[in-house]
Amino acid sequence: MSTGGKGARWATVLVVAHLVFAALWSVMVPLGEAPDEADHWAYITYLARERRLPQGPELTQSKHPPLFHATAALLAGLVVPGFGRLDSRLFLRANPDVSFRPEDVSAGTHAYNSFIHTTYEDWPWRPGPLAYHVARFWAVVLSTLTLWATYRFLRLAFPGQEDVALAATGLLAFLPEFAFIGGVLNNDNAAAFLGTAALWGGMAVYRSRNERFPGWWTPFALGLGIWAKVSTAALWPAVALLVFLSGGRSNPKAGLKRLGVVFVPALALAAPWFVRNWRLYGDPMGWALVRATVDVRTTPWTWADTVWLIKGWFLSFWGKFGSAGHIPMAKSVYVVLGGVTVLALLGLVRGLARGVGRRNGNPMSAPAARFVDVWSMGALFLAVVGVAFAMWRYSLVALGTDQARLLFPAIAPLVGLLAFGWLALGGTSWWRTVSSWVVVGSLALGIYALMGVVRPAYAPPSTVPASEWARLPRVVPVDFGEISLVAWNLEGDPVLYWLAREQPRDDIRVVLRVTAEDGTLVWEWKRSPGAGRWSTDHWPRGYVMRDAYRVRWPDWVGPGWYRVEVGAYEFLGDVIVPLRAQEPVATPEHPYVMLGWLQKP
């Protein structure tokens, strides 16, 4: 990859490419199918509707400062006025068949999607989904700004060597996890941008010579970072180190003066959030509210938990998708990524050793040695360690913290250290070649993750193949409005087969019931046919959906034979009275038709 004067142009290409790539992720990931995204949307709609901050645990995300949510609400409201008052049941309809186990999804009894996605979400977007996508695009903009700030920060952190900044920028531009989170509703995007901007500002102050106002934006980035996510406070020591050293190690008074100039306004900007927490919840961090809105850890921390946390951070740094990070890439991909990560760590050690050796007077030929500044490198490490330590401390309280997006305030130092490590393994020609490999490899990984992992996970199932259809016993179909039950199999767990007699207009739900002979209800399950992978209003005429169930027998049920009956209803509508040969076979009071008997061993 070209360096020098062309570096800024290459960086611009990468930033624009990321904007397009993240926007593609934003459109292709179904609404709500990202970590905590539905809860963040609830926060946004609350602000748009109520025009005030929530108090207490009425919203799970109310523990977070509102900067991202308020700006998203403002932008969405400009495009869709009054979106906060729309009926929330029009979309984001919970899927009872979501599973985090791939084997359940492969069996067809469950699905990866946490929500039923109906034609209401399709293009052209109607008011609710349109407002949602506008808010998502704000997240795309923030992730793009993060990439731009990352390049500017790393140019200063590694002065005179454009390849490190370009390689890191290229890595981050197409990194699957960063593109995924960068295209959905999450305050980690705002935290990543403001955290990176704060580090860039601190580095600008540190590198300043005769500039009048170097890093003038640093107080704003630090203070607003708190309003995006309190975890950005973990970056303050790294920024403080850079600002203090900018006065020169022989002039600590100048460093202290600069610290005051940067951190006094930053503290003033951040203080109202902590004061509000103190008044409402009794402490500046609002721990009472945090504990009321998270899954609280109830066991002591162990080494096994440490392994779990580090493993989760590693996997999700590269990419794990879905509403709970439950859609992984192939295991072989993570093995390869583990190998290249080890190479980066080895190169990092090699580059640092040679750089420190040069500073001590030992002549070195390795290019890495020419660009190691102990204090700027120390600030990179301090930023990463500071955020990681803060997340570990949070892990002592909350479960589900094994997600690398929580480290995004320090994403720029992370990718910078990885890039430096890879490039430090070789000579000058190696630097230029490897920086290109990093960009191409990241692009290939990002495309694979989107098109080879995420897209198939949410793709609609194919119609029942002719070979399976031919083996099914012929029965008189049972009509439920626009869909018909045309076959079923009660040997083992039930499997139903639904036919779209015409294009359904409604989101039809099915009720499968197992009862004792005397009518006692044993088990019941309500769902969108096919585990909710493809809502009925998407089905084309003639489409056949295989609808497999896994009966959960209560403990009090003994062996024997039990009745199986099925019904259907329109979501947000009425029950559908089943017909057979145009004649009702049930009543509105009991709208179920018996299919046969199911044996419990």
Image: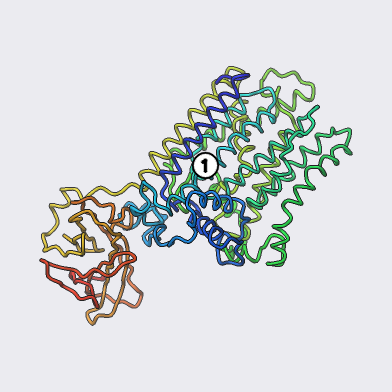
Front residue of this view, candidates 263 and 512: 263
Question: In what quadrant of the picture does the N terminus appear?
Answer: top right
Label count reads: 1
Residue 151 placement (x, y as % from top left): 62, 31
Q: Please give left or right for residue 113 compared with residue 361 in the image.
A: left
Q: Position of residue 242 (x, y in %)?
A: 76, 37
Position of 318 compared to 508: left or right? right
Q: Secondary structure at mark 1?
A: helix
- Quadrant in the rendering for residue 150: top right
Q: Is residue 64 above or below residue 122?
A: below
Local packing at callout 1 (Cα closer than 10 Å; few below 14, some 14-19, many 20+) is: many
Q: Position of residue 488 (x, y in %)?
A: 19, 62
Relative vertical location of residue 589 with respect to residue 325 in this rendering, above or below? below
Residue 225 coordinates in the image, percent (x, y): 66, 48
The quarter of the displayed image where residue 220 is located:
top right
Whether residue 517 sits left or right of residue 47 in the image: it is left
In the figure, is residue 405 to the left or right of 351? left
Quadrant holding the C terminus: bottom left
> What amino acid is labelled 1 in the image?
Val
- The residue positioned 56% from the left and 47% from the top of the image is 405
Quadrant of the image occupied by residue 147? top right
Residue situated in front as seen by the camera: 511 or 270: 270
Nearer to the camera, 4 or 493: 4
Residue at position x 61%, y 65% in the image = 291
For label 1, the residue is 140
Work out whether residue 188 can be spotted. Answer: yes
